[in-house]
Amino acid sequence: MRYMATYDLMETLRNTNQWLGATAAAMGSYPATALVPNPFFQMLAAWGDVTERTFHRMTVKPDWGITSVVTKDGRERLVEVEKLVERPFGDLIKFNAVGRAPRERRILLVAPMSGHYATLLRSTVNSLLPDADVYITDWHNARDIPVSEGKFDIEDYTLYLVDFMRHLGPDINVVAVCQPAPLTLAATAYLAELDPEAQPQTLTLIGGPIDPDAAATDVTDFGRRVTMGQLEETAIQRVGFKYDGAGRMVYPGLLQLAGFMSMNAEMHSKAFTDQIMRVSKGEASDHDKHNKFYDEYLAVMDMTAEFYLSTVERLFKDSEVARNEFVVDGHKIDLGAVTDVAVKTVEGAKDDITAPGQCIAALDLLTGLSDDKKASHVEPGAGHYGIFAGKSWRNNIRPMVLEFIDQNTGRHAEQAEKKKAQKTKAKPLTKPAKNKKREPMKEPSLPTRIPV
C-alpha cells in the first residue's frame, strides 16, 4: 500500500462521493420538483446534503470557534488566537482574551497527535479560559508538510514539547491529554536533568498510556498482536500529488477514519440515516447535535509514518517509558530526575481506550518525587472522552485540576521572574523587519543533538 496511487485512490473516492452528494442535493432541490407529489426528491436532496457535508469535512481543519469569553468581572472579551512559536510540524498558540490582565494560572494543553486536530480539545479550552491563560500545541497535518522538512517521530515530538515549555517558562502548568502523556512526562524529565530551571510547575496527565501493559484494552491487544512489518505494509502510504507533502510517508487520516467508523458501524449508520430524515423534514440545522459532533469527528489528519510506527513500537510494544528506558537524541532519560514538579494523574473508570492503571503508573516511575507532590484520581462512570471534555470534566475534573494547580502556585516563581528579566534584557531595541524569516528556537548548550 506504500504508493502514491493508493493514497490518490482514497482521495478520489472521497472526492467522488462529495461530488455525488452535491449533485444529488442540487437535483433534489430543483424548483420544478416541488410540483411532484412524492417525497422522493426531498429525500434525494436530504441524502445529498448529508453526504456532501460528510465527505467535505474529511479534508477541512475545523475552526476553533472560540470568539469570546466572559471573565469573572462579568465582561465579555474577544478572544484572539496568537501563534507564539511556529514550527514545521506544529505551533504553540495562545488564546488571548483582549484587554484582560494576565492570569496567575497559566496552562499549556498538550493535544494528542492521534488522527484528529487539536480542535478536539475546543471545549476543554473553553472551560479553562475564564480562569486561566491557556496555551495549546497545534499539530499540523503531515500531508501539508513538504518532504524537505525532514522526519518527525516521537523523539522530535518530545523535543518540540521541551522547546514549548522553555518558551513559556517554569511557572507554566502542563496538562497532557491522552496519547501525549508519556512523551510529556519524558519531556519534563529531560528538562529536570538538563535544564532544571525550565521545568514546569505542575504536570497533569489525563488518560495517558504511560504503561500500556498495566491494563489490557483493544488498543493494547492490537499493538501486541500485529507485527511492525504488517503495520508498515497495511497502514503506511505516500501522500499523493494533490498536497504539498507529496511523497511523504504517512498514516493517512482517511484510513484511520475507516478504522474508527468500522468499530461502531451500526451506530454511525443509524446516526446518518436519522440525520437524513431530519434534513428531509426541515428539522436539522448547521449546529445541531449531529453536525457539532461529526464536524469534528470526521475531520482527520495524516500522521507521519515515523511518528505512528515509533509510537506503536517504542511506547506500546517495547514500553520504553514504562521501563524508564526512553532515549531522546542519544540521551537516555531518567524519570527519577523529576524532583520539583507536582504531578497528578486522572483516569476514567470506564475508559476502554486507556484503561485505569495505565496512567497512574507514572507516579511509581517518579522515584525522585516526594509523595506530597503526587496525586491521582479515578473518575467514576467516565469514559475516555468524558475525562477531558464531557460532563465529568466540567463538573468534577476541571475544578480538581485547577485546585491542584492553585495548591502548587508559586513553586517556581523565582525562576520565572529570572527568566522574564533575561527575556526583557535580551529584547532588541528596534523591531525586526516584517518580512524577515522567523528563526527556529535555539536550545541552550545541552548534549549534542546527534511525540494512540
Image (cartoon, rainbow, N blue to C red):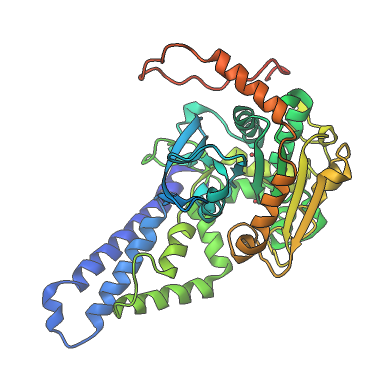
Can you give x and y, in whole percent of width and height, for residue 70 in the image? 47, 52
Quadrant of residue 263 within the rendered picture? bottom right
* Total number of numbered discs in the rendering: 0
Q: Is residue 298 visible?
A: yes
Which residue of the protein is positioned furthest toward the front in this rendering?
73
Which residue of the protein is positioned furthest toward the top in this rendering?
429
Would you place residue 225 above or below residue 46 in this image?
above
Can you give x and y, in whole percent of width and height, for residue 206 in the image? 69, 52
Can you give x and y, in whole percent of width and height, for residue 116 in the image? 52, 51
Q: Which residue is at the front of the view, 82 or 98?
A: 98
Would you place residue 304 above or below residue 10 in this image?
above
Can you give x and y, in whole percent of width and height, for residue 18 in the image? 32, 60
93 left or right, relative to 354: left
Q: Which residue is at the front of the view, 391 or 62?
A: 391
Which residue of the protein is positioned furthest toward the bottom in this rendering?
37
Quadrant of residue 274 within the rendered picture? bottom left
Instruction: Please tell me which residue is depicted at 25% across the width and 69% down the height of the picture.
Output: 24
278 left or right, relative to 316: left
Instruction: Please tell me which residue is depicted at 76% across the width and 23% down the height of the picture.
Output: 194
Instruction: Please tell me which residue is depicted at 71% across the width and 67% down the height of the picture.
Output: 350
Q: Which residue is at the front of the view, 187 or 256?
A: 187
Q: Which residue is at the front of the view, 23 or 356?
A: 356
Would you place residue 240 above or below residue 390 in this image?
above
Q: Is residue 330 visible?
A: no
